[in-house]
Each structure stands twice: as C-alpha cells, then as structure tokens.
Image: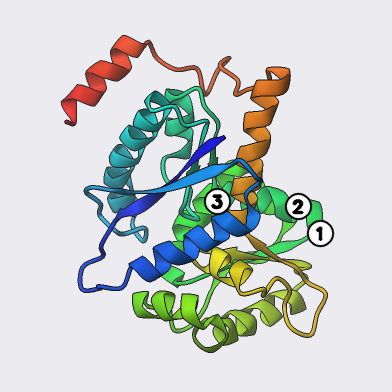
C-alpha cells in the first residue's frame, strides 16, 4: 500500500534551516504506526503561502494541494493524507480523485468520539481557531465537544519550538499543552486532541499519549489519519466500498479537470 502524506507548506520555511528535524520526526511516526507493507511518502508543495491563519492564504494554497493529490493518483498512490489540522481543500480534493483522501483533523475528531463523550482540541495559536472551528462545524461534530472546544496555548508555539520539540517535547511543548489540557478536562473533556499536524506526531513518538495525572487520552491526528487511510484502502480493495459519487463528491468530467489544471500550470 502506498500512501502520500501531503504537507501544506513548502520544504523550507523562510528563515529556518532545520526543518529536516520535523520531517525526520514525521517519518518516525510512519514507522511506528503504519502496518507492515504500508509505504508512506512525505511531499511538500513547491510553492506555498506557508500560512494557515488566514482563509485567504489557505484558498491560494489549496490550488497547489489539489494538484499534488491529482498527481498522486496518477502516480499510483492508494490514498492521500492531508497533513494539516485544518484539512485544507479536503472536500475539493475528494471530488477530484477516486482514491481515499483523509485529513488529520477530521480523522482526529472521528477517533476522539470513539474514545470518549466530550473532546477538546488544543492548537498552537489562537489565530488558527476560526479556521478549525469552521471545519468542526462543517463536519457536524460540535455537539460532541465541550463548550469552547478549540483552545490555544499561550504564547503560541514558534517554528523553532516545533523543531526543538521533536528533539525534547517534554521541555519545549508539553508543559504549555498540559496547562490548557487540564483546563479543558475541568470543563468536561474526557478526550484531548492534539490540534496540529506536527504536535500530534511529536507527542506520539515521545510516548506521551495520556494527560499526566489523569486517564484522559490524547488523540494524534497523524496516527488516526494513517490508520483510517489504510482502512479505507482495504475497504475499497476487499469489499468494493469507496467514496460516494452521488452528490457532493461526484467529479466533473476529466476533460474539465484537465482544462482547469492547465490554467494554473
């Protein structure tokens, strides 16, 4: 099984020269949680806004993501994971291709509802909250979350902290994450979602899967997405169940898709 993990940023973020630490960390997650025989390839965008704190910026970024996913299907990938918690372009991508497409955000929400009754999401910057709230409401999962379901650490995590966090999350990431988690638990959460495509894998590979001093599990959207992608591929191959083409995800003719793709090349 071949799965593409499509990152929503370019390979290098301006001003940082150690992004390979993040990519190496993500690859450790693939090794840890993917089934034997599953190959996961990490891809970046050649051009990216590198910004998910804006609907405007995400809109332009989604064009590149959709093109990369279409290419992945043409190259023989069995499924695609959108590796950002806001699931950029997920419905548009599902319309355009026949292979399964999962987002780390939607995957985390689905798994959280199987592990508890009320979940909360801890993200890395309050400026991302509107984007994530939009998707949470779109998916129809708000009634399974606590009041004020998406909360951010304060101050926000920096890119440098992401990088250092993969090397030592207990020093750079977990203390602030834990502080917000305990507030969410006090307000009724019995499951905590790590609301970032980097932070979730970081916690998983470090073995931090439960909030300290509690029995509250942490859901990593990266892990959830990998396992759900594998499941959807197997359901398609073994029993013939795949995405609905009746309404929302019915693709336009290939000629239309190809004409549109040419406009942006």
Residue holding disc 2: 113
Q: Earlier in the sequence, mark 3 or mark 1?
A: 3
Residue at the spot x=47%, y=72% of the render?
A: 124
Q: Position of residue 134 (x, y in %)?
A: 50, 50
Q: Quadrant of the N terminus?
A: top right
Which of the labelled discs sits on residue 116, or is there none? 1
Residue at the spot x=69%, y=75% of the render?
A: 184
- What secondary structure is marked by label 1? loop
Q: Nearer the viewer, residue 134 or 216?
A: 216
Is the residue 205 above or below the residue 167 in the image? above
Q: Quadrant of the C terminus?
A: top left
Q: Position of residue 77 (x, y in %)?
A: 47, 31
Tags 2 and 1 touching, CB below 8 Å: yes
Is the residue 30 above or below the residue 77 in the image? below
- What secondary structure is marked by label 3? helix
Viewed as shown, does residue 157 lie left or right of 173? left
Residue at the spot x=31%, y=73% of the render?
A: 18
Locate residue 252: give its quadrant. top left
Which of the labelled discs sits on residue 104, or is there none? 3
Q: Nearer the viewer, residue 156 or 21?
A: 21
Viewed as shown, does residue 41 lie left or right of 149? left
Q: CA distance from mark 2 to mark 1?
A: 6 Å
Is the residue 154 above or below the residue 198 in the image? below
What scheme was used to colour the molecule? rainbow
Label 3: few (<14), some or many (≥20) within 10 Å?
many
Locate residue 102: give its quadrant. top right
Residue at the spot x=71%, y=22% of the render?
A: 238
């Amino acid at each position: 099984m071949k799965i593409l993990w499509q990152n929503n940023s370019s390979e290098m973020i301006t001003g940082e020269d150690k992004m390979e630490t993040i990519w190496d960390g993500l690859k450790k997650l693939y090794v840890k949680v993917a089934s034997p025989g599953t190959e996961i390839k990490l891809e970046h965008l050649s051009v990216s806004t590198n910004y998910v704190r804006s609907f405007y910026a995400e809109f332009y970024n989604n064009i590149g993501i959709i093109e990369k996913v279409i290419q992945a299907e043409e190259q023989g990938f069995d499924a695609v994971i959108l590796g950002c918690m806001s699931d950029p372009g997920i419905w548009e991508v599902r319309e355009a291709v026949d292979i399964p497409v999962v987002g780390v955000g939607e995957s985390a929400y689905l798994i959280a509802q199987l592990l508890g009754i009320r979940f909360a999401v801890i993200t890395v910057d309050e400026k991302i909250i509107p984007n994530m709230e939009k998707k949470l409401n779109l998916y129809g999962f708000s009634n399974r979350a606590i009041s004020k379901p998406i909360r951010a650490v304060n101050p926000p995590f920096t890119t440098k902290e992401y990088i250092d966090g993969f090397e030592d999350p207990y020093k750079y990431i977990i203390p602030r994450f834990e502080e917000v988690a305990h507030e969410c638990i006090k307000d009724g959460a019995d499951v905590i979602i790590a609301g970032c495509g980097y932070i979730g894998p970081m916690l998983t590979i470090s073995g931090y899967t439960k909030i300290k001093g509690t029995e509250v599990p942490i859901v990593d959207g990266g892990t959830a997405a990998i396992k759900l992608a594998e499941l959807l591929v197997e359901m398609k191959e073994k029993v013939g169940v795949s995405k609905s083409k009746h309404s929302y995800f019915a693709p336009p003719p290939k000629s239309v898709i190809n004409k549109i793709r040419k406009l942006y090349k």
